[in-house]
Amino acid sequence: MTQGPRASVTARADLAPRRLRDPHADLLRDTRGMSREQSVARETWLAALALDRKDDVLLELELTLKGVVLWADPRLHPTRPGSAPLHERDFRPHVEVALAALTRAHALAGRLLGATRPPGALPRRLSVGFTEASRTEPWREPAALTPVESLAALRSAIGVAREVMLGLSGAERVPHRVFFAALTALRRDIERNACFNPLTLLEFRPEFDRVRSAEVLESLQLCETDTAHRLASLTFLSHFRLLRVVQMMASAAADPADPARAYVFLSVLRAEADALLDVLRERAGALLADALEREVLRLVATDVRARFESFTAETEQLSRTRAAMTASVLALRASVRRALERAVVPCGATAGAPARLAGFIDAAAQLSETLQHGVLRMVEVFRPGSDPERAVGDPDARRGATSQGRQWAWIFALVTRAFVAKARLARHASFELWSAPPSHAFIAEYLRHYRELGQALAYETLYPHRDRLTHALGALGDVDFVDDRTLDALVADCESFGAHLQLAVTSASERPELRGVALDKHRAGELLRIHLAGVAPVVARTLDALPPRS
C-alpha cells in the first residue's frame, strides 16, 4: 500500500550524494554512559569469549534485567478496566514473574562467566576502620573492575535479589511498597555496575544493534541533513531492537519451564515505545525545522530565487520524514497498549496456560507487524520501491505492511468521518441565532490527528489534494470562529480525503498478498479507541455517537 513521494523529490533523492559515514556511530557511542576504556575492555572481553551465540546471550541478559527493574512500575503491567487500587492489590503473582526472570538472568550470567567465576559478592565481615585497608577495599571502587569482575558482581547481586524474591513468594500477601523496595535495591546494584548497566531507555550497543539490511543502510545514506539522518537512525535502531524484544517475549511465553518471565519484556516494550514517542513527537519537528532554518539563513538574498525549487523539495521531504516517524511511533504505542490492555492476560488473573500463551502470541504477531511496517514506512520515505522482504528479512513482510497500511487507512477514515459529523453539527448550530456561536476546537483536534497520522497516510496513498487539505487545516487550527463558507469548504475537502482512504482500503484488500483476508475491524476498533483515549475526547465522543456502518 505504501507508494513513493512526488517525482521531483524522488529524483532529487536518487541524485543525492552518498555520504561516507557510519549511520549509527554517534548513537552507538553516545547513548550508553560508558568511558572509552570501559567500552573497549567490554568489547575485547566479548570478542575473546568462547561461547555460541554470545551476543544473543548478553542481549537477553541485559534486556531481562531492564525488564525486571521496570516491572516494579505498575503502570507498565498488563491491566484491565476496573482494577483494584494499588494499595489493595496483592503482588505475589508479580513476585513470581520477577523470580522467574531473575532465575533466567542468573543462569545467563553464569553462561557468560563460564568456568572462571571470580568472587563477586560483598565480604562477609565488615572492614576494620583502624587500618588503611578499610579505605581501599576493592568492592568500594566498582568503576575499576574488569568486565569479568563486573559480571561476577552483577551475578552476585542477581542472586541476592533472587533469594529476596524467593522469600517474598512464600508470604501471605505482598504489598506494592515491599515489592517495589526489593526491586529498587537490585536497580541500585545494576546502576553501580561499571560494564553491565542496561538501565537506559533508547540506548544502543555496537555488538547488538548493527543494522545489516542493505535497503535500510541505503535509505539512511540518502538523508539530506545530519538531523534527519540522526532521527532516522534512532527510528530504525529502536524498531529493530524492539523486534528482538518481541521475539524474546514470544520465546519466553512458549517456554514450558518458566513462561512467567515473558511479562517483563512487555514492560520494556511499553517504556521504550513511550520514550521514542516523546522524542519523535515532541522534538523531531522542531529539530528538522531548525536545521532547515539555519540552511535558509545562510543563503544570500540574491540566490533565493535560484534555490526556491530545491528548498521546496527539501521542505516536502522533511515534512514527509517527520510524518512517517510520528505515524510509526504512534501506531507502535497503540499496539503496545493493546497488548497490555486487551491481548495479554493480566498477571495474577485466573486463566489457564493456553489462554496466556494465546494472548502473548496475538500480541507478538501484532507488534511484529507494526514494527516492520514502521521500518518499511521509513525506508519508503528515502528509497521508494524497496523490497519489504530484503528490508526487514521476513518473507511475510509485504503482507504485514499491506495489512497495517489498510488497517490504519480504515482507522483514519473513521476519524475523518467523525470530524465531518462534528463539523456539520457546528454548521447546523450556526442557524440558531439566539444561541452562542459554536466552538470550533474540534478543528484543532482533528488537525493534531492529521499531523500525527493522517498526513503520513496522505503521502503513502498518494492523495492528490494533500497540500490543499494540509494548508486548510493549518490555517484554521488556531482560529476561534470559522465562517460557514470556509467550514463548508473544509468539510468537502475532508469528505474527499475520507473517500480516498476508503478507496485505498479497497485497493489494499484486492492486492495479491491480502486477497481473501478480511480486515479485522474488531482489532482496528480497539486500536482506534486506544489511540483516541485521553488524546481527543471530542472526536472520541463523536465517534461513539456515529450510527453503525458495515
Image (tube, rainbow, N blue to C red):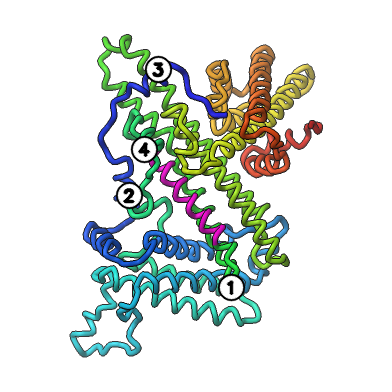
Residue highlighted by disc 3: 312
Tell me which numbered mark, 4 or 2, is placed earlier along the sequence.
Answer: 2
Q: Earlier in the sequence, mark 3 or mark 4?
A: 4
Residue type at tag 3:
Thr
Q: Are marks 4 and 2 in contact (CB under 8 Å)?
A: no
Q: Nearer the viewer, mark 3 or mark 2?
A: 2
Residue at 69% in and 31% down: 414
Q: Residue at x 23, y 59 (%)?
A: 40
Name which residue type carries label 4. Answer: Leu
Mark 1 or mark 4, which has the lower sequence index?
1
Q: Position of residue 355 (x, y in %)?
A: 70, 61
Classify 10 Å Cα crowding around label 2: few (below 14), some (14-19), many (20 and above): some
Residue drawn at 24 percent across, 81 percent down: 137
State the separation of the CA atoms marked 3 and 2: 33 Å
Residue 38's place in the image compared with 436, above or below, is below
In this figure, which residue is indicated by the disc labeled 2? 28
Callout 2, which amino acid?
A: Leu
Name which of mark 3 and mark 2 comes first in the sequence: 2
Kindly report the secondary structure that dominates the magenta region of the rendered protein. helix
Between marks 1 and 4 in the image, the one whose residue lies nearer the viewer: 4
Which quadrant does the C terminus fall into? top right
Q: What residue is pinned by disc 1?
A: 96
Q: How far is mark 4 from mark 2, CA to CA?
A: 15 Å
Q: Is residue 512 left or right of residue 56?
A: right
Instruction: Identify the residue position indicated by label 4 in the image.
Output: 217
Q: Residue furthest right?
A: 547
Residue 231 magenta-highlighted: yes
Q: CA distance from mark 1 to mark 4?
A: 42 Å
